[in-house]
Amino acid sequence: DNNGYLILMKKSLFFLLTGLACFAAHAQNDSASSYTWREIMIPMRDGVKLHTIVYTPKKQTEKLPFVLIRTPYGVGTGYAPDKNDYIKDMAADGYIFIAQDIRGRYKSEGGFEMTRPSRNKKDPQSIDEASDTYDTIDWLLKNIPGNNGNAGILGISYDGWLAIIAAADPHPALKAVSEQATPYDMFTNDDFHHNGAFRLSYGFEYAVLTEAAKTDSLYNFGEYDTYDWYLRLGPLSNINKKYAHGSLPTWNNFMIHPNYDDYWHAESLRYRLDYPKVPIQHVGGWWDEEDMVGPQEAYAQLEKKDTSHRNFLVIGPWLHGQWGGDEANNLAAIKFGQPTGTYFRQEIQAKWFAYYLKGKGDGNFAEMTSFQTGSNEWKHYNTWPPKESTIKKIYLHADGKLSFDKPSVNEPTAFDSYLSDPAKPVPYRTRPVEETYGQNSHWYFWLAANQRFVDNRPDVAHWLTDTLTEDITITGDVIANIFASTSGTDADWVVKLIDVYPNVDHQELSMSGYELMINADILRARFRHGFSTPEPLTPGKIEAYTLDLHGADHVFKKGHRIMVQVQSTWFPVYDRNPQKYVPNIYEAKESDYQTATQKIYHTAVFPSCIELPVVQL
Ligand code: PG9
């Protein structure tokens, strides 16, 4: 319901802008809290001091471990640890909590650098976020009495990235890490690009948020529906020409690094993670609108070298950070029938830290804990993806049909076609597209929004199964294999896998025919042979495109249908592809943007399909 939306939205905004880490500045005088706090400046190896808040239980009867949260979003407002929904279940066990502003943000000294690259270890004065965490832990062990010699770190999103970076180069006292919604690689996934397609509104607004000032800032668009603003903007170069004037370092880097080059490698976890050096838990949401891919990829990469069983994955039915404070009985309109967020914080997060930092509990954690949607049950897997799933291909057919039968026709006309017009791009969510972190923003839920709002657009193709006569469970990775051609020389392909609810739901009318996206992603076709080697397309040539749609754990229920949608714009979260090949899209001119006729094939030779990891019962 709408009220639920609003409450959740405000909470998410609060989490983001105050960084979840923000325990109480006023807790010192809070007689109802069992924690006191003090504010200190901790010196790093290069002399820069970081603003840090130390929260200690008022009655400490034993030596306690440290739990750190480091954040760019500002510490010092919010609630005491035992009043903060994110960590209150841990606070009940007793820890010394540490909240720190990272370099260059809020009350810390030094300069901020977006997802700062690794330091040069030959230079002892050089710093990065791992060395700042190392120096902080070192200082705490020596200067804060009553500690048990262990430290842990957790955090969501940027704070989660900071946690995994600390684990990549850890202090010996660091014994437990929970990275939650970390970005993995900003060119291939997560906040700034997906498969090379640029996240325009997110990239611009996030650069403003963190780089326009030392504290968080929102851009003043002067209008409510930013879809109009971004469309009127025209070519991307206009951001600097008209508005930012070169003042946002991250935006400037977007403009000069159009391909997957050393700049992107330097900040990517792909090149920074080796093996799990400390026990690490990766936590993510199936509908995380910002960093859904990060925890899945980081887990998969470390798992290859996890010889001592220290690498774990947890994914729930959540939007970005929802597990950090919400009961999460539902995600917008989608109901789970139980408080999945509370369960995570009490049964998974608190127990994880109690075991690794305090030796409490049996340490019997599942390799992968997943909240399976559709069935609405928690599941535990010994491997991820589970070996029990087998790939079944679901194929596109003529007349908008989707089925497990491979197409047998071979007529050259066996395709669906649409005209993609960059002047009228498909909105990624219903308009008005409010500023990402602005008032009343629906940004947070867009991946779980009803896709019916676009399924009858002439520039969105769709295919649909018959009504399912039995449940179909998919657990594992979903991959799209699309055969397509374009009349242009570059293109974007967006593929969505959708659960279509029954036409009429008498119990809950608003869910009738709901089109819930289960997996979706975008590929910028110039990068089909590699993200560092863009290549133009040949007009009319049919090519195979593979899109990793990432993990799912979902039951398409009997009575539902499965839908696939394909489109070539997803605006303004993704910029418009000019559809004419230019060496650098960030330097494209207005006149480079052109319409293109897209064809998606479904013949025996070009059988477009989605690979589903089906669990056979
Ligand atoms: N998604 C945000 C972010 C993380 C890391 C880098 C840039 C952006 C966040 O919510 O913190």
Image: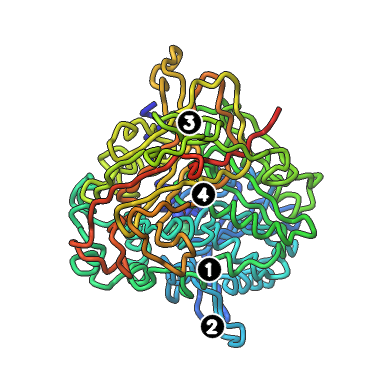
Left or right: 43 in relation to 401: right
Kindly report which numbered mark, 1 or 3, lies closer to the viewer in this rendering: 3
What is the distance, in whole Å, between disc 1 and disc 3 at their CAs? 61 Å
Question: What is the crowding at mark 1: few (fewer than 14 residues within 10 Å), some, or many (at least 20)?
Answer: few
Considering only vertical position in the picture, is 133 above or below 609?
A: below
- The reply to whether the C-beta atoms of the residues labelled 2 and 3 are less than 8 Å apart is no
Left or right: 344 in relation to 211: right
What is the distance, in whole Å, between disc 3 and disc 4 at their CAs? 27 Å
Whole-percent x, y for residue 579 in the image: 29, 57
Question: What is the crowding at mark 2: few (fewer than 14 residues within 10 Å), some, or many (at least 20)?
Answer: few
What is the distance, in whole Å, between disc 1 and disc 4 at their CAs? 35 Å
Query: Which quadrant of the frame does ligand 1 lie within?
Result: bottom left
Secondary structure at badge 3 equals strand
Secondary structure at badge 1 equals strand
- The residue drawn where x is 49% and y is 61% is 71
Considering only vertical position in the picture, is 298 above or below 340?
A: below
What is the distance, in whole Å, between disc 2 and disc 4 at their CAs? 35 Å
Residue to which mark 3 is pinned = 402
Residue to which mark 4 is pinned = 292
- The residue drawn where x is 25% and y is 40% is 432
Whole-percent x, y for residue 433 in the image: 28, 43
- The residue drawn where x is 54% and y is 83% is 46
Residue to which mark 1 is pinned = 40
**The disc labelled 4 sits on which kind of residue?**
Met
- The reply to whether the C-beta atoms of the residues labelled 2 and 1 are less than 8 Å apart is no
Residue to which mark 2 is pinned = 46
- The reply to whether the C-beta atoms of the residues labelled 1 and 4 are less than 8 Å apart is no
- Whichever of labels 1 and 3 marks the residue nearer the N terminus, that label is 1
Secondary structure at badge 2 equals loop
- Whichever of labels 3 and 4 marks the residue nearer the N terminus, that label is 4
